[in-house]
């Protein structure tokens, strides 16, 4: 099991995330702090109401993995766009 702490979620703060089993729609993640074996997530609902929930370490790891995958995908898209732009310019 990886060693997560609340700073692992800095890249998700202010972004919409899905916390299935906790909220029926995506919510904006505002803060995360470690509590016991899990994490307290302060969120903003779509109607702008603040709320919070506790997620397990396993849920936190899954959420963190999604963030890392999305970041890697975004980097790949930027790299591919740059490469395509270069190919276009060298023709």
Image (tube, rainbow, N blue to C red):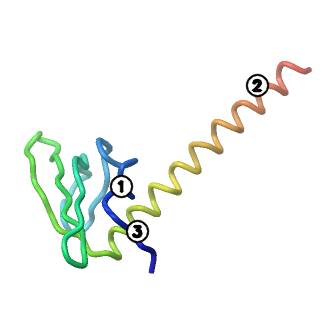
**Is the C terminus in the top left, top right, bottom left or bottom right quadrant?**
top right
In this view of the protein, which residue sits in the foreground, 78 or 37? 37
Q: CA distance from mark 3 to mark 1?
A: 11 Å
Q: CA distance from mark 3 to mark 2?
A: 34 Å
**Tag in front: 1 or 2:** 1
- Expressed as whole percent of the image width and height from the top left, the position of residue 71 reads 52, 48
In this view of the protein, which residue sits in the foreground, 4 or 17? 4
Q: Is residue 75 left or right of residue 81?
A: left
In this view of the protein, which residue sits in the foreground, 91 or 70? 70
**Tag in front: 3 or 2:** 3
| Residue under the image location 26 percent in, 75 percent down | 56
Q: Earlier in the sequence, mark 1 or mark 2?
A: 1
Give the residue number, with chain letter if any, for mark 2. Answer: 85
Above or below residue 25? Residue 1 is below
Query: Is the C-beta separation of discs 1 and 2 under 8 Å?
Result: no
- Could you tell me which secondary element the residue under label 1 belongs to? helix
| Residue under the image location 31 percent in, 52 percent down | 17
Q: CA distance from mark 1 to mark 2?
A: 33 Å
The image quarter containing residue 76 is top right
Q: Earlier in the sequence, mark 3 or mark 2?
A: 3
**Is the N terminus in the top left, top right, bottom left or bottom right quadrant?**
bottom left
Give the residue number, with chain letter if any, for mark 3. Answer: 62
Task: Estimate how packed mark 3 is, as few (under 14), some (14 to 19) or many (20 or more) residues with alpha carbons within 10 Å.
Answer: few
| Residue under the image location 15 percent in, 64 percent down | 53
Task: Estimate how packed mark 2 is, as few (under 14), some (14 to 19) or many (20 or more) residues with alpha carbons within 10 Å.
Answer: few
Q: Earlier in the sequence, mark 3 or mark 1?
A: 1
Give the residue number, with chain letter if any, for mark 1. Answer: 9
């Amino acid at each position: 099991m990886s060693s997560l702490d609340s700073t692992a979620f800095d890249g998700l703060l202010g972004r919409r995330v899905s916390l299935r089993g906790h909220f029926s729609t995506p919510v904006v993640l505002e803060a995360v702090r470690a509590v016991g074996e899990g994490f307290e997530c302060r969120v903003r609902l779509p109607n702008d109401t603040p709320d919070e929930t506790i997620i397990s370490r396993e849920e936190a790891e899954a959420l963190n993995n999604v963030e890392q995958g999305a970041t890697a995908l975004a980097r790949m898209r930027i790299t591919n766009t740059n490469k395509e732009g270069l190919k276009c310019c060298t023709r």
